[in-house]
Image (spheres, rainbow, N blue to C red):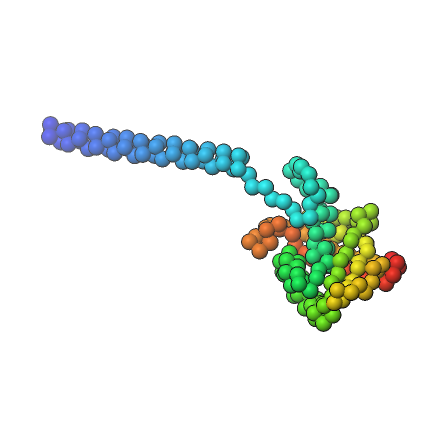
Amino acid sequence: MNLDELSKAVRRMMTVVVVFAGLATVLSISSLLALFRSQAALERAVNERAVMVVPGAVAGEYIAGLSEENLKGVARYIGQLGTSFTPANFKLRMDELMAYADSAYLPTLANEAKKLEMEVVAQAQGRFFLPDTQSERLVVVGNNEFEYTTTGSWAFSAGGLALSQDDIGRVTVRFRLGQSDQRNKYGVKILRFSAVRAKGAQQ
């Protein structure tokens, strides 16, 4: 190897070293920036955690996880949507109730709501269900799947006039906890809903 070839080889090696050093510097800076961004995102997640309030939840301070009372609160709220309404807010409450329905159960629930709407509109009917908290039962029926039952007084009115004051209602809500989405921000999926009315004080 003569002097010119040796000189060229040295220059090529120097070029490779410089390029490698430049790439290493860029990668190091990028890694540091990514690390700082990740740290900032983590701090925001810790310091600015979103607080999700379960509908119908009892007022108070809650720790992570769901207690039996939280789950009863969810079911109690759902039960109220389908049993307590006026002609003015009926559609809004049914729309919210159906927003929580599981996709397989939605057609059934929508059909029942449509039939109920005809009765409510024809009679200008209002209803108010007051659950007896002592009668509330919550049973685990599967993985993240629960069934809530309760009884309570159920008052009916038509055209602003009371039809009954001492009827009894029995409400059953079977639901599953799943992933929240834009339509169902709480992730509650109704699998079955029923409200049965008994005349007078009969259970």
Question: Residue at the location (81% across, 50% down)?
Answer: 132
Question: Residue at the location (79% across, 59% down)?
Answer: 155
Q: Quadrant of residue 161?
A: bottom right
Q: In which quarter of the image is the C terminus?
A: bottom right
Residue 19: x %, y % from top left: 25, 34
203 shown above or below 34 = below
Q: In which quarter of the image is residue 129?
A: bottom right
User: Is there any visible trace of residue 102 in the rendered image?
Assistant: no
Q: In this view, does 202 lie to the left or right of 40?
A: right
User: Is there any visible trace of residue 25 in the rendered image?
Assistant: yes
Q: Is residue 136 left or right of residue 103?
A: right
Residue furthest out toward the front: 160
54 shown above or below 8 = below
- Considering depth in this image, is 12 or 61 the residue closer to the camera? 61
Residue 138: x %, y % from top left: 77, 48
42 shown above or below 147 = above
- Considering depth in this image, is 101 or 95 the residue closer to the camera? 95
Question: Residue at the location (46% across, 33% down)?
Answer: 39
Q: In which quarter of the image is the N terminus?
A: top left
Question: Residue at the location (55% across, 39% down)?
Answer: 49
Residue 35: x %, y % from top left: 42, 33
Residue furthest out toward the top: 3
- Considering depth in this image, is 180 or 21 the residue closer to the camera? 180
32 shown above or below 119 = above
Residue 40: x %, y % from top left: 45, 34
- Considering depth in this image, is 135 or 140 the residue closer to the camera? 135
